[in-house]
Image (cartoon, coloured by chain):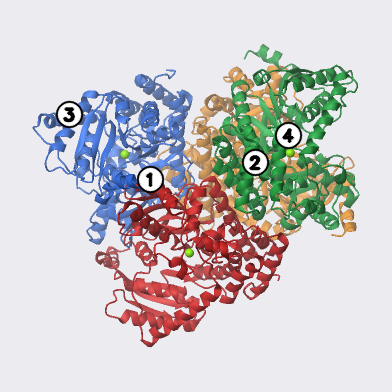
Chain colours: A red, B green, C orange, D blue
Amino acid sequence: MALKELKENNKEQIEDTVKDIKIAYIGGGSQGWAKRLMSDLALESKISGTVALYDINFKAALDNEKVGNLLSKHPDVKGKWHYQAVQTIQEALQGADFVIISILPGSFQAMGSDVHQPEKYGIYQSVGDTAGPGGLMRACRTIPIYADIANHIKALAPNAWVINYTNPMSLCTRTLYEIFPEIKAFGCCHEVFHTQELLAHMVTDLLEIEVKSRKEIKINVLGINHFTWINRASYKNIDLMPLYQTFVDKYYEEGYEIKKGAWRESVFESCNRVKFDLFKRYGLIAAAGDRHLAEFMPPWYLKDPETVKAWKFRLTPVDFRIQDQQEKINKNQKLLSGEEQLEVRPSGEEGVEMILALLGMGDLVTNVNLPNQGQIAGLPLGSVVETNALIRKDSVLPVMAGQLPLDIHNMVQRHVYNQESVLQAALNKDKQLAFNAFINEPLVANISRYKAEKLFNEMIENTKDYLPGWDI
Amino acid sequence: MALKELKENNKEQIEDTVKDIKIAYIGGGSQGWAKRLMSDLALESKISGTVALYDINFKAALDNEKVGNLLSKHPDVKGKWHYQAVQTIQEALQGADFVIISILPGSFQAMGSDVHQPEKYGIYQSVGDTAGPGGLMRACRTIPIYADIANHIKALAPNAWVINYTNPMSLCTRTLYEIFPEIKAFGCCHEVFHTQELLAHMVTDLLEIEVKSRKEIKINVLGINHFTWINRASYKNIDLMPLYQTFVDKYYEEGYEIKKGAWRESVFESCNRVKFDLFKRYGLIAAAGDRHLAEFMPPWYLKDPETVKAWKFRLTPVDFRIQDQQEKINKNQKLLSGEEQLEVRPSGEEGVEMILALLGMGDLVTNVNLPNQGQIAGLPLGSVVETNALIRKDSVLPVMAGQLPLDIHNMVQRHVYNQESVLQAALNKDKQLAFNAFINEPLVANISRYKAEKLFNEMIENTKDYLPGWDI
Amino acid sequence: MALKELKENNKEQIEDTVKDIKIAYIGGGSQGWAKRLMSDLALESKISGTVALYDINFKAALDNEKVGNLLSKHPDVKGKWHYQAVQTIQEALQGADFVIISILPGSFQAMGSDVHQPEKYGIYQSVGDTAGPGGLMRACRTIPIYADIANHIKALAPNAWVINYTNPMSLCTRTLYEIFPEIKAFGCCHEVFHTQELLAHMVTDLLEIEVKSRKEIKINVLGINHFTWINRASYKNIDLMPLYQTFVDKYYEEGYEIKKGAWRESVFESCNRVKFDLFKRYGLIAAAGDRHLAEFMPPWYLKDPETVKAWKFRLTPVDFRIQDQQEKINKNQKLLSGEEQLEVRPSGEEGVEMILALLGMGDLVTNVNLPNQGQIAGLPLGSVVETNALIRKDSVLPVMAGQLPLDIHNMVQRHVYNQESVLQAALNKDKQLAFNAFINEPLVANISRYKAEKLFNEMIENTKDYLPGWDI
Amino acid sequence: MALKELKENNKEQIEDTVKDIKIAYIGGGSQGWAKRLMSDLALESKISGTVALYDINFKAALDNEKVGNLLSKHPDVKGKWHYQAVQTIQEALQGADFVIISILPGSFQAMGSDVHQPEKYGIYQSVGDTAGPGGLMRACRTIPIYADIANHIKALAPNAWVINYTNPMSLCTRTLYEIFPEIKAFGCCHEVFHTQELLAHMVTDLLEIEVKSRKEIKINVLGINHFTWINRASYKNIDLMPLYQTFVDKYYEEGYEIKKGAWRESVFESCNRVKFDLFKRYGLIAAAGDRHLAEFMPPWYLKDPETVKAWKFRLTPVDFRIQDQQEKINKNQKLLSGEEQLEVRPSGEEGVEMILALLGMGDLVTNVNLPNQGQIAGLPLGSVVETNALIRKDSVLPVMAGQLPLDIHNMVQRHVYNQESVLQAALNKDKQLAFNAFINEPLVANISRYKAEKLFNEMIENTKDYLPGWDI
Ligand SMILES: [Mg+2]
Ligand SMILES: [Mg+2]
Ligand SMILES: [Mg+2]
Ligand SMILES: [Mg+2]
């Protein structure tokens, strides 16, 4: 490189800004996640560029384009981005520096089968998108989609950083690496953040110390997405592990909520009683919402709706999701018509912070989902695990998280190998292997194998449109 | 070494015999295993020496001494051994070249709790000595005994080869290595031999070829004791894996017995229907008796006595064991009084062949239980696994067995980690960890956790005499 | 499979014979190795079929065809094979059950550069085909040839067993697996056999016991081809390791030869003084000829021709190889004209025994070269190592060999990583990486790096016809 | 814990200070390192407590006590510490929260043998404290001292964080973990910092951008201490790897110095020509001073004093060290007499920052020496490697650094295994193993083995007072 050219190219750095970034947004038509990104981008002045919006629902992408560009024009907005809906994934990926994926695999109807078909056999799921019979079925239809996306990224944007938000998180990320091992991808989820918030409130509750931000709660995270564990937590020089023991003792029976009564209002809320119970039994802090955690365990917390209620968390009926989606669409109409403006406030997600870190604008240590290179001892290399990582200019390096205790390790690795089985089953359209994983899910293992077979076949049948090539 | 001395020392080799061997036999008071060894030693002319008999029941050891020495005096007997009962384990181990361990950990009463207490909660076990609630409890009382034996071996016979016959096989062997990592120990079990016999009969049944010996059936074994799998089997140039598919198709419904009707006569027999079912579902040949295999699975085969009957195998009530023991004692009286003579015939065990191989008298390739050094890919190093090994002069080297398919691997490793938990629980008297392993047993996971807790506490209470130091 | 068909197919097994085998022989035009195989096949009555002979010198293949078929017609010959020269490697491989590869990579002229160019810089090599500057150059021209062979095998005979005899052994075998990871290949070398013979003679020398066959000397082998080590050796119940200490003490100065004076007659012979010296310094038995061992070490034994003489082994000038080849060709003329007949006697190689074992006709435990799956602890997985393996019907399974002592391990792994570098350099035509490996060879590290660079470039230049695509 | 007590205990946190810390300083009598710590502590107001000073030279410790306490009394000093010389290591360690070790193992006379005895055989060393014949000898006398320190820490301060500054860094740290595997120790060295400074100057030199601090240069470090490599470097959004190529091209011949001409003034300085040469050959940025790097390579840069000069770096004669030490002592007299005051300025070391991070006062990512848990792929687990780590409240977690290129990996692992050999040799007083490591040092491998033996024996003899128990 000629020196002159070097100097020209890097001038911008003196100003600490990066321009002309291209972000490809895959999915997002379902409104929630795309809006969050727009809001976070609007708040950040250091970076600017284009966001290409691709969704299988082109109309939805066009709406997002409009909302995004309206926002950018607003004088108070610091981050100026150009939003552009595109008709093909190729157009979106071409030249992208970052790819964000947030899709709905299949339909609400398929999700209805995932969540509610098992109820006919006495299997209740609080979410149904990660573990359990529903999570498994969802994975079977998502994996081929992700294999396809990975091939496109390999062809068109092999050097882009890829951030996944879709569930099942581990298997989506795992598929990207299976198909394109050199991909620079990782998965993000906010469940751990909420646990940090809980710990921040615990510090205030027990010590009467105000904590400025959940980020001041330092944790060591290890496990798999939605079944993640904290074996070390601190606030400044205070070790929070013994404090959490006190906290659990205090609130075990009634539970603890940051916002009192929220769990009765929202299906996403809980009183953390499942989390407290897991601590009593296993000694670590489970770092996901109760609704996720419960699905990785035997039906201790999900035996039936009464049990769920007693543990003070909620099932998430797909009807609720449909209605929620409709509300978002209505809201969107108002944004499009200019009747309302997109409210700009931090989403709580870290996508934009991560992009800044990847552009060299400050180190970030946070939890991400990545193939295991040894950051969790004893889990198979290559399986996607969740730990802290150090994010810097063009690199995401896992921080060594150590080893889980034997009993938790055993529960986690059962899911890890079930996920590996599902990956192979989905890629090879292997019904037998898929069923062997299905019946090995803790939520399924409690019914007879004849019922399990029946349920499996029904769920396959219900969603067969999304399982091309399977022998159904 | 002076050359002259070298020559003197090694003269014997020209004759292919080894004299003055000392075998320490720990346990064996329960009659069965010690008699088998006596019989096999009597049939082998190449080796001779002393067998020191140690049992916590000294009277039983004395009886064995008498029977053994009577046998050696008999003119037809080729292997001449001197049997001597000793009062302490130290006397037995001092100067031993080989140590054979075959004990009953605890009492028949304790075994009664292992097997029958869970029945009150609808958990049926066909053996109750390896996996399931019974196997776990038995392990908890056996591990401290084996820790003690390991310490004695370390002090008195650190170079001796140690052969274990006691169940739970994996955990007994694992404990020896945990306490004395340099120990030269391995565990032996005949379950795989019986599967070879089944395959030999299959060859005859399907191909009308007579197979001389089960040893002509070459197999690759991998897994853990009593939950072992064969992924490759051959007879001469015939690949037996596709043949087994035909065999399973032929006999799936009615089952197959080597000796027709035997399963109705003996609790140890079965019609191999569980084995056939596992093949249909998982694609490998399970290499243990159905009664063992069933205990590692969810209660598919052990739901209740009717289910067991439908699968054509048997539960083993402890009453039966007590009665069987009494018959052996009566039989022994006749041997001691000279009314009967010990029948000398090959026991089917390989202990004596192994001793010959370890003395340099011929290579032996057979399945043994050893700490994993990588012979099974993906299982944790140090956990005790069952694979083939090459046995030669003073060495037992595992043969690389490869990797289990994902679905079987997942089931096996769940038991492996449960076993590791039980080891730590037993060594540290950690009730919580023991319970976390207990409730993670596939046979237990199907009852509610409240029932599981109740059952666990009752079983602990029933056998507390054998759990010194536990907080009960 | 229908039962009837099953029975038909397997009838042959009752007779313990296998017919209609196809062996593809790649190379062999240089006469030696092909003749050995013919001789061994002629001595074995259990198997028969066709040997397809492919060599880049078709005339040589035709000559071999004639010699082989003449042999088969001879009434005393037990093994009846049809030999057929073919013009393409595809014809040879199509339908092959076994593939044997034994080629001369490049020409004698290229070999002349390998061996003698370094002498101009004071680097003497006793063989020049495995390690050192010559071994490295030879590897660079062999690897693309083996990559090509691997691709043909993948396409035409993916299920065949592939036996490699070509040097550099480790890198030839490594290349096959790099290109076609599912290949069923292993490499064979007789150097370890000769060490067994030495140990057999040692037993006679020191103990006055006759040993029937080298196979009665049981050894544990570990290392890489031609730099292999024995850490355990026994004859019957006699531990040979302390005996070897006595043997080395006795013969350290004068050396020991099985056939007195042979080393003065033949470049292939030695007095084992290098082997004895390595034992004194490192404590294990080096298990290859001195001429190979010396090339893996710093120039302790190869400083100059006088040093070589003092250690009582020989350099192998390429002139000698050319003359030796001419003699073989002359000899061949007599065979072709009928003036002489191929002498049928065991070659000492194990290829035919291995084929028998792979066909299910008896287990074989012997040393082979295979990718490391953990059979040698601490060496990188995938690198080709030499240890014992258990050969059975359609399987070659490494036996766990354990770990080398730290100091030997360090010397071995330096070569292992140099070999990995050469593999990558040859596949990617990366001169810089090739040179970094070159200068890291212990025989090269002693000259200045400027001289090393000059030498490297000359050797590349001399053999550039065999380095297509390199930037020379 | 009662809530009230919890609140009391943690009140201090609101103020962001930690009081009553005890630091044990082992060594430091040689003046340099202890003064640096005092200075850094004086600059930091957030922490305070006691520093217990232990040195085998009690007088030196008393002097340090006096200097330290004088400093603390000074009104401008922010960090108030009480310094106290103690007569035993036990007193120092009792109750320590942090242990800092910085000793001189042996004497200057012994160091003279390390550095200069090899010169008689044509082996020149620029430092002689890490690799090469001198580094090895130094390790042999340091390891037993560190074994002793580890035992004391285990007994008296098992929960303290231990920071090592003594060379040979890797082996000192390795010994601590070998003796007390649960120790919380790591090693610190500033060589990497200097490379960051070089890169910062490069940015200014090539791009005319001022870099505020070396800490803005983000790097990924991997290797072993003093032979560490950078495979990724950035400043903000600028990738520095291609820039470094330009930099090396520009300055390869003349070299580059931050302070022009410094290398002629100080033995510690260089013109980075070795570093540039290594980049040209191996493609990564070597991250230590040229004087250290040169010792890990064959004698390319250290052939003789002229070669050293041509590469523009310096040998460090021990006479210089003796004189330097005398100057420090003289300087110290002035401090003690009050004639001068200790100058308080940042030392450039990170010890105090690390203590702050370990106390929960801010995350720190920096390079440290720790046992490999997989942070460098392919290097043996347990060997001490240098990579980045995340330092937080009571935890130091390595960041995954990835894998070295094959050629560098090979050079690094040769030293890693040599170090392991030295560790075992020193602990077991095994001269043969020590010599096998010695002759495998790249600087030694170039002389004949007879000379190497002679040299080894002389060096052992020269320092035998520090090798108790060796068979000399
Ligand atoms: Mg999530
Ligand atoms: Mg058994
Ligand atoms: Mg060879
Ligand atoms: Mg340093």
Q: Residue furthest bottom?
A: A337
- The residue indicated by pointer 1 is D395
- The residue indicated by pointer 3 is D329
Identify whether C28 is placed above or below A267.
Answer: above
Q: Nearer the viewer, residue C362 or D281?
A: C362
The subunit carrying tag 3 is: D
Q: Nearer the viewer, mark 3 or mark 4?
A: 4
The subunit carrying tag 4 is: B
- The residue indicated by pointer 4 is B108
Callout 2 environment at 10 Å: few (<14), some (14 to 19), or many (20+)? Answer: many
- Which quadrant of the structure image shows residue D69? top left
Q: Nearer the viewer, mark 1 or mark 3?
A: 1
The tag on residue B459 is: 2
Q: Earlier in the sequence, mark 4 or mark 2?
A: 4
Establish whether labels 1 and 3 are both on one chain: yes
Q: Nearer the viewer, mark 4 or mark 1?
A: 4
Q: Residue furthest left?
A: D339
Give the structural element (helix, strand or loop) at label 2. Answer: helix
Q: Nearer the viewer, mark 1 or mark 2?
A: 2
Give the structural element (helix, strand or loop) at label 4. Answer: helix
- Which quadrant of the structure image shows residue B217? top right
Identify whether A17 is placed above or below C237.
Answer: below
Mark 1 vs 3: CB contact within 8 A: no
Establish whether labels 3 and 4 are both on one chain: no
Which amino acid, by three-letter code, is at mark 4?
Phe
